[in-house]
Each structure stands twice: as structure tokens, then as C-alpha cells.
Amino acid sequence: MSNKNKKSNKNSNIKWVFIITLWTFILATSVSIVSESILRNFNITLAFISLIVVVIFGVFFDIIGIAVTASDEKTFHSMAANRIKEAKYAVKLVRNAGRVSNFCNDVIGDICGIISGAAGTIIVMKLVNQYGFTRITLISVVMTGLIASLTVGGKAIGKEFAINKSDRIIFLTAKIIMILDENLRIDVLPELRNSKNK
């Protein structure tokens, strides 16, 4: 790789770090405010359902983040040669595995952590207010443990699945991205370039 290309990749990486840091701050603070406001109006059942949904959502994106680093680009080159449209999106995902993984595992993971934490807090508050529980600290500790165990357990299961079915997962992800791009004109990978960041 020439010095010019190395410098271009370095500048691109610096730009990515800046953009993802800024967007994470904006998304995290916005989600925190919105989730707190919405969840306060939920009863215990809805808050708990929201907690489960958010954990599943986080695990889903974690699977994509792991799969993209485990997937083989050559598989999709063969598909592209056979004019399978999803293949070019899959190649783009795999070539930018570092950035895609960073977004799916870190950004989405943090946001899901914020929302699940807010849901857990609301559940504890509802339990204390409605049922008169006095051991708030104990309930909070149990809720924190429950959220952590659900998240870690879900990601542990998802990790094995992501590694074993990585190509299939990336193909399905590429299909969704293609639909967004072609039908809704939403390009979710506008800043990604053809540089492998594994």
C-alpha cells in the first residue's frame, strides 16, 4: 500500500472516530431522555416487556457485529459473479467489518444498555410505589443482575450462532440494506469505503 493510500485510510479512520463519537453522544443523550419520559408512563408489565424487547434488540445487533467480522468476503464475490444483487452490499459490509462491528456492538449496545437500565429503574420504582417494598437497594441489585444476566446470556447464545452462520446472517442483513437503499432511498452505509477493517 502506498504512502498516499495509508494517509488517506488514516484520515478516513480519524473522521470515522470523530463521527461515531459525536453520533453516539447525540443518540445516547436523546435516547436516555426519550426512554425515561416514555417508560415512566408504562405499568410494570409494559416496562418489563420493553426491557425484554430492548435486550433482544441489542443481542440481534451484536449478532450482526460478530457475524461481519467472521464472514468470508470470497463467498459474496462468487454471488456477485452470479449477479445476485445483495452480494455487493454484503461485500461492502465485510470490507468495512471494523466500522460495522463498532456500530452494532458498541453504539447500539450502549444505547440498549441505557434503555434497559431506564426500564429497570422504572420497574423498581413501580414495585416500590405500588406494592410498598421497602428494601429498595435489594430490589435494585436484583434488577441489575437480571438485566446483566439476560444481556450476557443472550449475547453468549448469539455469538455462537453468529460465528456458525455468519455468511447467512450477512446476506440477510445485506438484503435489508438493499431494500432500504433501492425502495426507500436510505443509504445506511454512505461513509463506508472499500477498506478491510478487520
Image (cartoon, grey):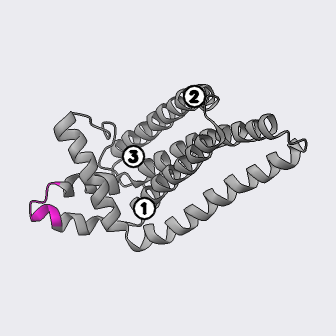
Q: Is residue 2 left or right of residue 58?
A: left
Asked which secondary structure carries label 2, the reply is helix
Q: Is residue 72 visible?
A: no
- Residue 69: mark in rendering: 1
The residue nearer to you, when weighing 180 against 54, is: 54
Gap in angstroms between the C-alphas marked 2 and 1: 35 Å
Residue 3: x and y in percent read 37, 45
Q: Which of the marked residues, 3 or 1, is nearer the chain's N terminus? A: 3
Which residue range is magenta in the image? Answer: 79-85
User: Residue at 27% of width from left, 37% of height from top?
Assistant: 187
Quadrant for the C terminus in the image = bottom left
Asked which secondary structure carries label 3, the reply is helix
Please name the residue that numbered disc 3 is placed on: 6
Locate residue 33: give its quadrant. top right
- Residue 38: mark in rendering: 2
Residue extending farthest to the front is 131
